[in-house]
Image: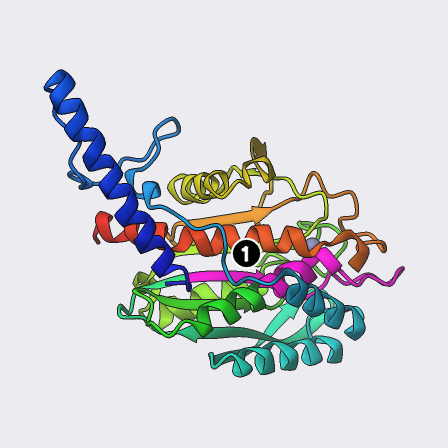
Amino acid sequence: MIGIQDDTHNFQTRTARFVLALCLLLLVLAGSACPRNDKGPGPRVGVSEQPAETKTPVSGATAFNGERAMDHVRKQMDFGPRVAGSAQLGKTRDYIISTFRDSGIKIITDEFNAATPIGDRKMVNITGEISGESKDVIIISSHYDTKLFTNMQFVGANDPGASVATLLEIGRVLGANQQKPKFTYWLVFFDGEEAFCEGWDQCGKPDAPDNTYGSRRYVTQLRNSNELGRIRALILLDMMGYKNLELGRDDMSTRWLQDIVWRTAHDLGYGKYFVDRPEGVGDDDHEPFLRAGIDALDLIQLSGYPYWHRADDTADKVSPQSMKIVGDVVLGSVPRIEQYLESKGR
Ligand SMILES: [Zn+2]
């Protein structure tokens, strides 16, 4: 799937031989039955139980390059503040599109008009498509706009510079794979996640929030084109590049998806960065998807990021290592997510 298949296969073969040898030994010693190498009647999801699917071995070395991701962060810093509807966000959009085109990824854009508290704004969602054997879709996503501030220069290195950069680099790795993936991947950049008013809920009405413009539009479009059912899972990246990385469990997110990602982080030796404390996020771009019945996970460090929505959310707060950790974990989780979804059926 992600350029690690040969290693994984060898590992699986070695592991299978080892398990077989161990079973034969146990049979001789105790006459006990060995576990079968199948998944049984279906996935079990629980807080204390590890889903069987997460036992798929993972390799720690993916082709994700933290320095390349850091270059993408610096490029966004060069553009300056990147508020929805601004020329600077237009430059960011061109950069995202040309970076994905270089990786051979098909681009779909959706331009729309959003009514905001400061008037109508043009917004554009960007989707990079890597088509798979199945039309079923796994979305990996980030917002790409920065929050509007009139009293300071806000460049958002971590919010959302790092998640945009990480998604671009994940796209490069997935796009470089010669083998067609099992599922279709949509790498989505949402416009207009940030509120125009200072507070998240300050200016919105229940039926027209002043935030998540792009993700709400995305779900509406999927519903209108009868494609909502194609989306099997969504992973959202948001503020995950802090040099002192520590991601808690967002309490809105779908548990089985979160468990697979946390287990993968642990298996890759990144367990200390994916901790078991709850992360209260409130809404984010995954919320419209959850509301539409789509399983979704937000990877976000909100409470533990001291520079959130501050002028010093600058490139020195973000590290190539943190982006690589998250990139490796997402790429390592993908085969396990596919396996879980396949075993679950529809
Ligand atoms: Zn923000």
Residue at image coords 47%, 79%: 105
* Residue 298 can be seen, yes or no: yes
**Residue at mark 1: C-beta within 8 A of ligand 1:** no
Secondary structure beneath disc 1?
helix
Residue 263: x and y in percent read 44, 39
Q: How many marks?
A: 1
According to the image, label 1 marks what residue?
327
Residue pushed farthest top? 30
Region rendered in magenta: 139-166
* Residue 232 can be seen, yes or no: no
Q: Is residue 191 above or below residue 210?
A: below
Residue at image coords 12%, 24%: 27
Along the line of sight, which residue is nearer the eye, 40 or 289? 40
Identify the image quadrant of residue 37.
top left
> In the image, is residue 180 part of the stretch drawn in magenta?
no
The amino acid beneath tag 1 is: Gly
Quadrant that contains the C terminus: bottom left
Quadrant of ligand 1: it is: bottom right
Identify the image quadrant of residue 21.
top left
Residue at image coords 19%, 36%: 20
Quadrant that contains the N terminus: bottom left
Q: Residues within 10 Å of mark 1 (few under 14, many from 20)?
A: many
Residue 42: x and y in percent read 20, 41
Residue at image coords 41%, 63%: 2
Residue 153: x and y in percent read 86, 63
